[in-house]
Amino acid sequence: MLNLYGSATGSNLSGKKVSSNMGGLIELADEYGVEAGVGGNVTYYTGSVSMSANQQIYDLTDPSIVSLEDGTPGTDAIEVKRIFHEAPPAIVKYFDPFVGTGLGSQNMLEGFGWGQFSPGVSFMMMPMNADLLRMQAIEFNDQIRKSTYSFQLINDRIKFFPIPNGSNFTKVYFQYIKKSDRSNPLKGEIGTVSDFSNIPYQNVTYSHINAVGKQWIRRYTLALCKEMLGYIRGKYSALPIPGADVTLNGSDLISAGQAEKEGLITELKEILDTMSRQAQLERKQAEADSLQQQINKIPLKIYIG
């Protein structure tokens, strides 16, 4: 069923090989992808909040300051998934490593007698670990000595840190989903396989059945005939003849026919179970293990070089 979910119901699958695929499993995992923000079957939209100086708290349902990609705030319930409110990267506060590292580099170049060149720092390149250490120092300095970039989202109200001053940022963007999209259980296309009832298997043509299948049909037909004949003979328990009565075996035929039918159905189920992919893989694994045990008993040769 996992291999057939979502396929078209108009095609006939009788006599065709159904290949295994990951489509059903991936579709089951789509909901997890939505919550993790890595894919899924719910659309992510983009919105923004216009900031004002010295205002820290904003209402996400206010259409005068909030802009949503799919419409007007308040018309549909949304859920904010990600807010792009982060501190500027340390690299923007750092010089190009191909130009040097500022005053420290200049002093070093002066000691080598290269300070008269203009610009003197163009003649020295610092190693990569020096750049990483400097950027790490900038980030630690901003986290400890400055108000960190953060936010607090409760219901429809969002609070930003630090307090906007009108120059550090004017808009904050965010990603959101519509709750109606996530709660909608009908995300598949119409006219596709949804359950066992609409799998497009049609009646198998008798001429296409192999000898094993035809033999099973003959035996099942014989059992049906026995049962039907038993019902017919059961209408009259005995027939009068001159000087005696003849007792008919209707009940015996009915019991024998029903028992044969149940046995044939059980036999067919067992055959189909042994032909499943799981049963074939288990048998192949057992065969490989037995073969490996036999190979391990073969004496190893000793090679003398």
Image (tube, grey):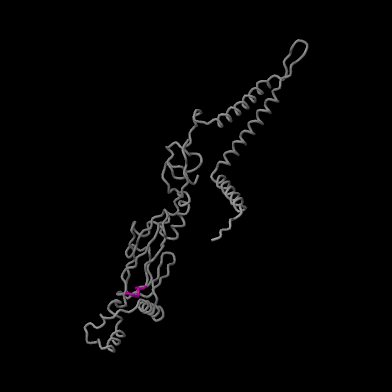
Question: Is 89 one of the magenta-colored residues?
Answer: yes
Asked if residue 78 is positioned above or below residue 262 in the image, the reply reads below
Question: 135 or 113: which is nearer to us?
Answer: 113
| Location of residue 22 in the rendering, given as x and y in whole percent from the top left corner | 46, 50
Q: Which residue lies at the image location 71% right of the left edge and 22% below the top edge?
A: 249
128 left or right, relative to 222: left
Q: Position of residue 20 (x, y in %)?
A: 48, 46
Image coords of residue 152 (percent x, y): 42, 70
Placement of 284 over or under 71, stated as above or below = above
Instruction: Spot the residue most to the top.
Output: 242
Choose top left, top right, bottom left or bottom right for residue 85.
Answer: bottom left
Question: What residue appears at the point 50 percent right and 39 percent down from the top-left corner?
Answer: 197
Q: Quadrant of residue 242?
A: top right
Coordinates of residue 292 in the picture (x, y in percent) = 59, 51
Above or below 116: residue 84? above
What secondary structure characterizes most of the magenta part? loop
Seen from the viewer's position, the closer of residues 91 and 108 is 108
- In the rendered structure, does residue 207 fall within the stretch colored magenta? no
Q: Is residue 116 left or right of residue 26?
A: left
- Of residue 285 and residue 303, the one placed in the foreground of this image is 303
- Region rendered in magenta: 87-91
Farthest residue, direction right: 243
